[in-house]
Image: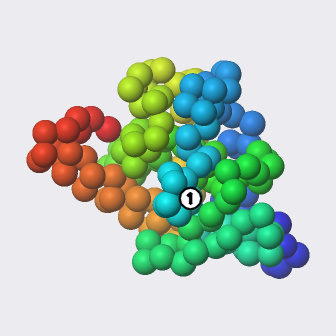
Amino acid sequence: MSERKVDRVDEALRWARERLRDLTPLKSDCGRLCGAACCRSAEGEETGMLLFPGEEALYAADPTWRLKETERGTLALCSGRCRREERPLACRIFPLLPVVREEGVRVALDLRAAAVCPLGRGGLGALDPAFRTAVREAGGALMGEARQAAFLRRLTEEQDELRRLRRQFGGEGRV
């Protein structure tokens, strides 16, 4: 992390990233199931992971990452290989998403991950409970900071819209 003044965003983000540093969806290497599909772009596509607010400072000066500004936020684009401890938070929580509900932060399978991640077919119960807990706790920590909370609410709204569209067009809508 850079030498700039640490603010509350950085503290919540740092804590969330550290909480998920060594945990993965399965107790084994889930990338073996799908050939690490989540780390590759499809031929002719340029995809990346949406960075959480403030996270772009961690990647701006690193030549292994390319940042791309979009209307949704900053995407981190990589070659498909990175040092595991430097993954963006979105990579660390994949294929889950902390969603904001009236009763608090819950964990859901990220509907955007369905196209590339076979783990969603088994539902939440197929994933390591420690991983699920860590994603929920990370979401709870991020909700303590206004920018992070707004970001999680926006991701939740997008998730809810995807679920609504899936139901409307006959797809599975469980989250």
Q: Nearer the viewer, residue 63 or 173?
A: 63
Image-quadrant location for residue 173: top left
Q: Residue 43 placed where, x, y %? A: 51, 54
| Colouring scheme applied when the structure was drawn | rainbow
In percent of the image, x 62 and y 65: which residue is there? Answer: 76
In percent of the image, x 25 and y 56: which residue is there? 161
In the rendered view, does 113 fall on the left or right side of 16? left
Q: Can residue 100 be seen in this view?
A: yes
Considering the numbered disc 1 on the image, is that residue within a helix, a strand or a loop?
strand
Say above or below: 134 vs 100. Answer: above
2 left or right of 151 in image:
right
Frontmost residue, 66 versus 103? 66
Q: Position of residue 116 (x, y in %)?
A: 46, 41
Image location of residue 82, percent across then percent down: 76, 51
Give x and y (percent) for residue 100.
39, 52
Could you classify mark 1 by the number of other residues whose Cα lies within 10 Å: few (under 14), some (14-19), or many (20 or more)? many
Q: How many labels does the image show?
A: 1
Residue furthest out toward the front: 44
The residue labelled by disc 1 is 49
State whether residue 110 appears in this view: no
What's the residue at 74%, 75% (across, down)?
A: 60
At 42% across and 31% down in the image, what residue appears?
Answer: 120
Q: Quadrant of the C terminus?
A: top left
State left or right for residue 89 relative to residue 45: right
Q: Which of 105 and 123 is in front in this view?
A: 123
The amino acid type of the residue labelled 1 equals: Met
Question: The N terminus lies in which quarter of the figure?
Answer: bottom right
